């Protein structure tokens, strides 16, 4: 007598997909807490530009030991693309964002930055019409964006338009969108660790031309007294090793495997994490409205990823 036995097998491809989604989620959760560390370092006396230089330098030194020791790309065109990654994912992104924070409301900055996933989808579609604008992506994105608005304003509903600050924030969101798309292009040619190392290197190098253009705002001073404090070093090491090196590696892998459109969708979670981290560490209040916003964010992200 022949017996039929059915054993449930795990699809290895699907298991890997889950791993890449987890990488993206862990990355945005950590990035959501970087606001708190940055705020601590600013209170210690460091400027946003100094923080960026230190965190990217630490990240570059650490990743050098595990990345391929290849110094340059195979050709000058690819090297230019890597410089573009350092600009869009490094110096220009952080400089425009931090400058905007000094000009316009932080709520405006958080809300506009969360348009990045939609920008990625539209730019990808504009550059390649084979990339479809799926209905589930648009619906889920707008649900999540509505949740972001509730979380960011936290029940205050105060929106003040500042043309320059809001424009700089939009440029910052645009930079990150282009970074994800350039990354997708280069991921097929070079290892992720090499690309990530290049981002840190050119992120620091391209800071210096920007300092010549904006000398009043962009300046770096080595303050040994601040750097000798344990609180400053703990936060700098967290930003450099965890939030920069490890997170950029995980994000770049996720973009390579899931694509920039669906990976960017997890950016909606960043304000949610920031609000709760600020509540736990900085004792900032969380209202019922922000909890409703949190539910909308999670549902919007789930809607896109589940249907995608």
Image: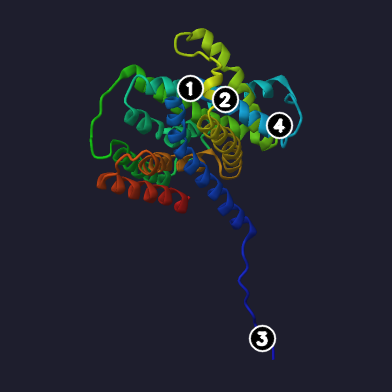
The one nearer the camera, 213 or 283, is 283
> Would you say the residues marked 2 and 3 are in contact, meaning their CB atoms lie under 8 Å apart?
no
Q: Is residue 110 above or below residue 221?
A: below
Q: Residue at x 23, y 35 (%)?
A: 157
Mark 2 vs 3, N-terminal side = 3
Whole-number angstrom distance, CA of label 2 to CA of label 3:
65 Å
Mark 1 vs 2, N-terminal side = 1
Could one spot residue 84 in this view of the protein?
no
Of badges 3 and 1, the one in the foreground is: 1
Q: Which residue is mark 4?
A: 64
Of badges 1 and 2, the one in the foreground is: 1
Look at the image and name its color scheme. rainbow
Could one spot residue 293 in this view of the protein?
yes
Q: Count of labels shown?
A: 4
Rendering coords of residue 86 (x, y %)? 59, 24
Mark 3 secondary-structure assignment? loop
Whole-number angstrom distance, CA of label 2 to CA of label 4:
15 Å
The one nearer the camera, 217 or 251, is 217
Q: Residue at x 54, y 18 (%)?
A: 223
Q: Which residue is mark 1?
A: 46
Mark 4 vs 1, N-terminal side = 1
Crowdedness near tag 1: few (<14), some (14–19) or many (≥20) residues, C-alpha within 10 Å: many
Mark 3 vs 1, N-terminal side = 3
Whole-number angstrom distance, CA of label 3 to CA of label 4:
57 Å
> Would you say the residues marked 1 and 2 are in contact, meaning their CB atoms lie under 8 Å apart?
yes
Crowdedness near tag 4: few (<14), some (14–19) or many (≥20) residues, C-alpha within 10 Å: some
Mark 1 secondary-structure assignment? loop
Q: In the image, which disc is placed on residue 54?
A: 2
Q: Is residue 281 left or right of residue 234?
A: left
The quarter of the picture where residue 162 lies is: top left
Of badges 3 and 4, the one in the foreground is: 4
């Amino acid at each position: 007598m022949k017996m039929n036995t059915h054993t449930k097998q795990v699809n290895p491809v699907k298991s890997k997909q889950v791993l890449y989604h987890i990488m993206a989620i862990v990355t945005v959760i950590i990035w959501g807490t970087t606001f708190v560390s940055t705020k601590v370092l600013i209170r210690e006396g460091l400027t946003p530009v100094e923080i960026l230089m230190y965190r990217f330098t630490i990240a570059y030194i650490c990743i050098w030991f595990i990345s391929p020791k290849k110094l340059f790309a195979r050709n000058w065109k690819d090297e230019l693309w890597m410089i573009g990654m350092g600009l869009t994912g490094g110096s220009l992104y952080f400089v425009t964002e931090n400058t905007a924070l000094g000009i316009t409301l932080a709520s405006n900055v958080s809300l506009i930055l969360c348009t990045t996933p939609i920008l990625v989808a539209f730019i990808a579609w504009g550059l390649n019409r084979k990339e479809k604008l799926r209905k589930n992506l648009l619906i889920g994105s707008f649900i999540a964006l509505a949740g972001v608005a509730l979380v960011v304003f936290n029940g205050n509903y105060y929106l003040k338009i500042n043309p320059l600050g809001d424009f700089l924030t939009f440029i910052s969101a645009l930079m990150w969108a282009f970074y994800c798309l350039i990354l997708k292009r280069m991921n097929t040619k070079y290892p992720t660790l090499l690309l990530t190392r290049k981002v840190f290197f050119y992120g620091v190098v391209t800071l210096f031309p920007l300092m010549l253009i904006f000398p009043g705002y962009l300046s770096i001073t080595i303050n040994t007294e601040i750097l000798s404090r344990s609180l400053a070093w703990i936060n700098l090491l967290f930003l450099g090793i965890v939030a920069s090196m490890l997170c950029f590696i995980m994000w770049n892998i996720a973009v390579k495997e899931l694509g920039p459109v669906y990976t960017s969708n997890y950016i909606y979670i960043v304000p949610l994490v920031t609000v709760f981290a600020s509540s736990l560490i900085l004792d900032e209040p969380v209202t019922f409205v922000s909890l409703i916003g949190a539910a909308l964010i999670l549902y919007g992200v789930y809607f896109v990823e589940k249907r995608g």
